[in-house]
Image (cartoon, helix red, strand yellow):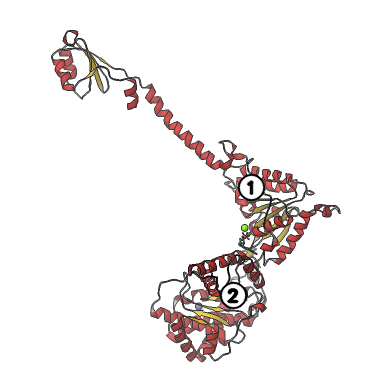
Amino acid sequence: MALVQVWFMPPTGRPISYSEFKTAVRGSQIAEITIGEQLIRGTYNRDMDGGRNFNTTRIEDPKLLEELDASGVKYTGEFVSRWLPEVLSWIVPLLLLFVLWNFLMRRMGGAEGGVMSFARSKHRTFAEDDVKVSFADVAGVDEAEQELREIVEFLKTPGKYTALGGRIPKGVLLVGPPGTGKTLLARAVAGEAKVPFFSLSGSEFVEMFVGVGAARVRDLFSQAEQKAPCIIFIDELDALGRARTQSPMGSHEEREQTLNQLLAEMDGFDSRKAIIIMAATNRPEVLDPALLRPGRFDRQVLVDKPDINGRVEVLAIHSKRVKLAPNVDLKVVAARTAGFAGADLANLVNEAALLAARRDKPSVEMKDFDEAIDRLIAGLEKKRVMSQKEREIVAYHETGHALVATLIPGMDPVHKISIVQRGFGALGYTMQLPLEDRYLMQRGDLLNQLAVLLGGRTAEELALGEISTGAQNDLLRATDIARAMVTEWGMSDSLGAINYDGQRRNKFLDMQLGPERGAYAEDTARLIDSEIKRIMGEAHGEARRILSDHRDMLELVTRRLLEREVMEGDELRSLMNLPPTTPSPELTPLPETEPTT
Ligand code: ADP
Ligand code: MG
Ligand code: ZN
């Protein structure tokens, strides 16, 4: 506004000082003046100064008018037109807002451009024409691979199957824990069948604006129909296909519309056109039942974590690009990585390679793998040192686990004991390595396992006469087992062979289906509690009996452990005058090596 005034109303005449102006007023040298807001402009008397113009900056001067009257100067006020500054002060911010909004809209619309076109995704192609992945890149999921080979056949020669009146399956749902290679398998199917691969992740369908997701689905299917035979792959289907609910807030409007559109498209397209819709999820239980009915995702393929042979193969695939030292035995690595999914194994190989590189080794050695496994299993080795007393408690505790595990006949041999502190929580661990695969546990096995779990705490009791907080996780796991024995496996005589839990567990996916808790009477609940207590008490007694019988051994092994911090299983057995056991990983398809902390 200041600028506008300067530009549009430039002062005219000679600038003079205010005092000069006052002198001129008193001397009656001035004919007339115009008093503006900031400026006083005027004209001298003709006889005085040839009637020249002047201007001066206005100063707060209450007496001015009296003096002007006294000397008979003609004075007027000045009208300043305000429309321009006024208008500008409105328009400039509005303009700024508009530019900002436009910019944001463009960003949200992504490559789709303009302000109004975000609902369309015309410029987006979902297809990948030449997928390089094949079944050779996937290992350890043989059953899933077998089923998917059939799909590859459908895609390669659709005519062969439809000629006899068969209907090509429309939807295949890959179900399995994260990192087991579901996305990889879907791409491998496209790669094997040499068909275009249309992929989109479930979350991409769910947009801020209602209707955009549905439009994407329509777009995707119309693009795919032109390219049949092909595969449409929807990753993380649960983001989109969650069961529709009656929500009072209507907050899932967009997702439901998208889901409805997907269902409609799946029903709508011509099943003679070889389009196969694949989807992946690790949470099948939240999916809308409508998605799973025949004609939609009626084929479900379980992609499970690999067994030991599978792990060897996955490791082999991922270590192809890594320089391995001759001492690396992938079978041993696989034996130590029970429960690892494909992605974890890929990560493990990479981690081992990085460790070797950090130490400037020419190739990746077994030691690097060992360390990488330890890292992945229990977190990074910590530098913080424990006090001598704490180390002693942990040493007794871990020795307790190890002795009970070694002294009970038929238990999995101890692989390693360590009191090196790791990650958060674990102060030490005892690792057992099973010699054979287990699909079933007998009641005796479970009781023995309870004794091993309680062995740590019992050793503290015996040796130090005091118990610590270190056994919390052991107690938790032991109690879980005891409770399951009573309520799920019918192993308590007084409660009988009844499942009180009321839950259907899917043992592959680690998830619970069905109601929260079984229905049973108050009295039964009390009985269950007392049975759990009895079983735990028995296991505790067993651990105490074993450890008191071998009190000297407990001292000996603990002292050695305090010296060395880490002890291999064979060293422990030689201390105890027992023959060494070498685990033979070839013979063990699915060992569990859960560290006992
Ligand atoms: P998911 O989709 O099941 O979560 P991914 O297919 O994305 O898992 O797997 C991630 C990565 O892990 C893959 O790119 C691959 O490198 C590796 N991987 C996972 N499973 C396997 C497997 N069975 N065989 C080989 N590599 C695998
Ligand atoms: Mg995935
Ligand atoms: Zn423990």
Going 58% across and 68% down the picture, which residue do you hit? 323
User: Which of the 4 image quarters holds residue 154?
Assistant: bottom right
Q: Is residue 392 left or right of residue 211?
A: left
* Picture quadrant where residue 1 is located: top left
Residue 144 placed where, x, y %? 71, 63
Local secondary structure at mark 1: helix
Give the residue number, with chain letter if any, for mark 2: 326
Residue 25 position (above or below residue 473): above
- Report if residue 263 is visible in the image: yes
Q: Is residue 490 left or right of residue 595?
A: right
Foreground residue, 526 or 544? 544
* Image: 583 above or below 108: below
Displayed-image quarter of ligand 1: bottom right
Residue 56 coordinates in the image, percent (x, y): 22, 21
Residue 198 drawn at (x, y percent): 67, 50
Locate residue 141: give its quadrant.
bottom right
Of the residues shown, which amino acid type is indicated by label 1?
Glu
Residue extending furthest toward the front: 362
Residue at disc 2, secondary structure = loop
**Which label number is shown at residue 256?**
1
Whether residue 418 sits left or right of residue 130 in the image: it is left
Q: Are marks 2 and 1 in contact (CB under 8 Å)?
A: no
Judged from this view, the residue extending furthest toward the right is 164
Q: Amino acid at mark 2?
A: Pro
Instruction: Note whether residue 541 is visible.
Output: no
Q: Is the residue 416 above or below the residue 114 in the image?
A: below
- Distance Cα–Cα, label 2 vs label 1: 56 Å
